């Protein structure tokens, strides 16, 4: 069996669509779509993934099934209720006074206030409160000082995990993923996959960086925090895994490429900075990254 994890093209988070650059990326990805030899396609319900997939579906003559659990992984930490976790988010500050345009918020931020309210006029009016934070946006110093986050099993005992919405959300996503693979003959069992029926089919998932790391962590029985901290798969990139069945009836998934953007290089399109942070701390701007 072959799996493809395809990240959406460069997004405009404020509208959950693609930027003009993102549409160029999606068009170049679509040129490569027939060569991806996708048998079954699945897509996140979020607009940026849907729009990216639509280019490829048209080019490959395919349709994609929407799966709700493929949406971006969002199991937030509420710093207003867990101030002891502020050390994990070193540059996060409470909200300034009201009046910030909603267009300046990412999709997650816009829906992530404790009261869950962004007024209809598009202005935030929750001064003094912290936005909900994703558990995977933690600082590298906190990560290094908490080795349990790197441990294949110990990450489930970490404070970030236990004090976020991860316990239910992670298992929900992984269970749905395992059920899908089982329907194609690969049953998750004891850290490997029992092969009930051999398959050479390709499953393609058009989704997001965060949830891709969750799915990879399930396949590889490793910590999602390890992948969140160490992988930066660019927008429109392709990650490809094959089953390896060296012992009859048993399989593991092995990556042949991670975050491949050769279609962008072929089309002369620069790789987006989306998903990265500032390369050097002294150069912090909207154009080059974020702290």
Image (cartoon, helix red, strand yellow):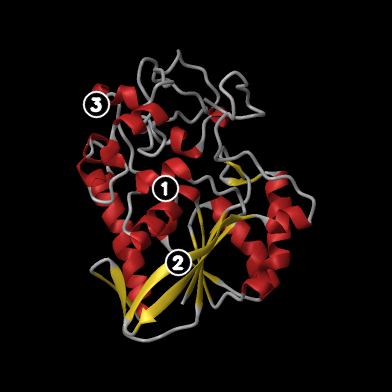
Of 177 and 146, which appears nearest the observer?
Answer: 146
Mark 1 sits on what residue?
A: 227
Mark 3 sits on what residue?
A: 82
Of 86 and 247, which appears nearest the observer?
Answer: 247
With 161 as the anchor, is 24 left or right in this view? Answer: right
Q: Where is residue 34 in the image (x, y as percent from the top left)?
A: 68, 73
Element on which disc 3 rests? loop
> Is residue 184 shown to the viewer in this render?
no
With 244 as the anchor, is 248 left or right in this view? Answer: left
Could you tell me how far apart the alpha carbons at marks 2 and 1 are, in whole angstroms? 15 Å
Neighbours of disc 1 within 10 Å: few (<14), some (14-19), many (20+): some
Q: Residue at x 57, y 51 (%)?
A: 48
Of 287 and 131, which appears nearest the observer?
Answer: 287
Q: Which of marks 2 and 3 is nearer the N terminus?
A: 3
Neighbours of disc 3 within 10 Å: few (<14), some (14-19), many (20+): few
Q: Position of residue 60 (x, y in %)?
A: 66, 73
> Is residue 9 shown to the viewer in this render?
yes
With 151 as the anchor, is 17 left or right in this view? Answer: right
Q: Which mark is residue 254?
A: 2
């Amino acid at each position: 069996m072959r799996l493809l994890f395809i990240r959406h093209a460069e997004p405009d988070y404020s509208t959950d669509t693609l930027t003009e650059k993102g549409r160029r990326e999606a068009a170049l990805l679509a040129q490569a779509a027939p060569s991806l030899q996708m048998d079954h396609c699945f897509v996140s319900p979020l607009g940026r993934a849907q729009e990216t997939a639509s280019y490829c579906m048209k080019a490959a003559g395919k349709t994609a099934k929407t799966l709700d659990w493929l949406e971006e992984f969002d199991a937030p930490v509420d710093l207003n209720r867990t101030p002891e976790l502020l050390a994990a988010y070193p540059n996060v500050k409470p909200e300034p006074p009201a009046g910030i345009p909603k267009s300046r918020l990412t999709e997650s931020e816009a829906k992530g206030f404790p009261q869950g309210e962004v007024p209809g006029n598009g202005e935030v009016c929750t001064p003094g409160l912290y936005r909900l934070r994703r558990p995977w946006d933690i600082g590298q110093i906190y990560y290094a000082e908490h080795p349990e986050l790197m441990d294949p099993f110990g990450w489930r005992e970490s404070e970030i995990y236990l004090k976020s919405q991860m316990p239910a959300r992670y298992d929900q996503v992984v269970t749905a993923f395992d059920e899908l693979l089982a329907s194609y003959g690969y049953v998750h069992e004891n850290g490997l996959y029992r092969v009930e029926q051999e398959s050479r089919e390709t499953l393609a998932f058009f989704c997001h960086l965060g949830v891709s790391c969750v799915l990879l962590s399930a396949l590889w029985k490793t910590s999602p925090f390890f992948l969140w901290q160490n992988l930066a798969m660019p927008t429109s990139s392709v990650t490809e895994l094959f089953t390896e069945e060296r012992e009859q009836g048993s399989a593991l998934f092995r990556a042949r490429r991670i975050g491949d953007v050769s279609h962008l290089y072929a089309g002369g399109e620069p790789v987006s900075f989306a998903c990265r942070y500032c390369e050097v701390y002294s150069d912090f701007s909207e154009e080059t990254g974020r702290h």
